[in-house]
Image: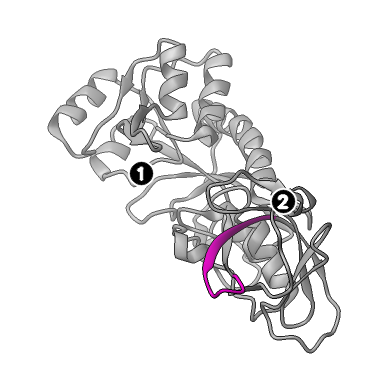
Amino acid sequence: MGTPDFAVEALRCLVEGGYQVVGVITMPDKPAGRGHKIQYSPVKQYALDHHLPLLQPEKLKGETFIEELRAWKADLQIVVAFRMLPEVVWDMPRLGTFNLHASLLPQYRGAAPINWAVINGDTETGITTFFLKHEIDTGEVIQQVRVPIAETDDVGVVHDKLMKLGGRLVVETVEAILQDAVKSIPQEEMAVMGELRPAPKIFKETCRIDWNQPVKRIYDFIRGLSPYPAAWAEMVQPDGKTMVVKLFETEKKEVPHSLIPGTLQTDGKTYIRVAATDGFIEIRALQLPGKKRLKTDELLRGFRLTEEFKMN
């Protein structure tokens, strides 16, 4: 059960590993883009390409779906980046249902664990497999793998690292369950450094940059949202009009200054930097409304930017 690319890797590892995948469950099709064309989820596309039985339930408690799921007679269910399941679903297989979660549980329970680990400046994250129970992301842990986060990694880089490792961990977890070699651990018994932090769903307003913060905090925030959904700020033009600018790549310059946070500096040719409370964020790649993502020097060749502009 899954929807995005992150889930496809686990499905691919199972199929190529010779496991009997009796069926695949993914989200219903939704229109996407300006033309509102129906776009298949990555998991659906993989299932179709490999002729795997497929279900796309609107309601996970619907009688029709429950009957179709029961007819598959699955011994084990695996969930990767899907929806919260009702007990009638996760309690159905004789060997249970386990989830692959992109954090070192019990840290970062929620919908966006990879983003929040990077946003918070963590130097380590990981993946966890755990058995499902009533409360979301709280079941007993089966296995974990730790992964370092480099200071220059954005969320796209970390996502891809975890995706590859996650596929392998799913297969290892399946093998352990089939061999009755699992010794799961309640999350409340696991050692945790510091306070538990949540990983709530990210919305557009979540992604707005607050320049009245230290450079390191802003730098981590931007890379924790790059390449998607992307951190943004309002650029105020000399005539007072504003435009939303998305930022993708930056560098941090921790140098003292007396400027108001949000003050913009540029030579109009090669660099753009914005004042934070204790230094500057130097912008390396950005996107203007209706335009494609560009390196700073590329953008400045076609857009006249002066120090009369500022960032809000």
The disc label shown at residue 299, or none: 2
Q: Which residues are magenta?
A: 237-248
Secondary structure type for disc 2: helix
Q: Given this view, does label 2 or label 1 mark the residue nearer the observer?
A: 2
The disc label shown at residue 83, or none: 1
* Residue ranking furthest to the right: 255
Seen in the picture, residue 266 relative to 35 is either above or below; the reply is below
Q: Is residue 243 magenta?
A: yes
Give the x, y percent position of residue 54: 33, 20
Q: Residue at x 62, y 66 (%)?
A: 192
Give the x, y percent position of residue 277: 72, 83
- Viewer-closest of 312 and 88: 312
Secondary structure type for disc 1: loop
Q: Amino acid at mark 1?
A: Arg
For residue 146, say whether it is visible: no
Q: Amino acid at mark 2?
A: Leu
For residue 139, say whether it is visible: yes
Give the class, few, some or many, for how many residues have Cα within 10 Å of label 1's Cα (few <14, many ≥20): some
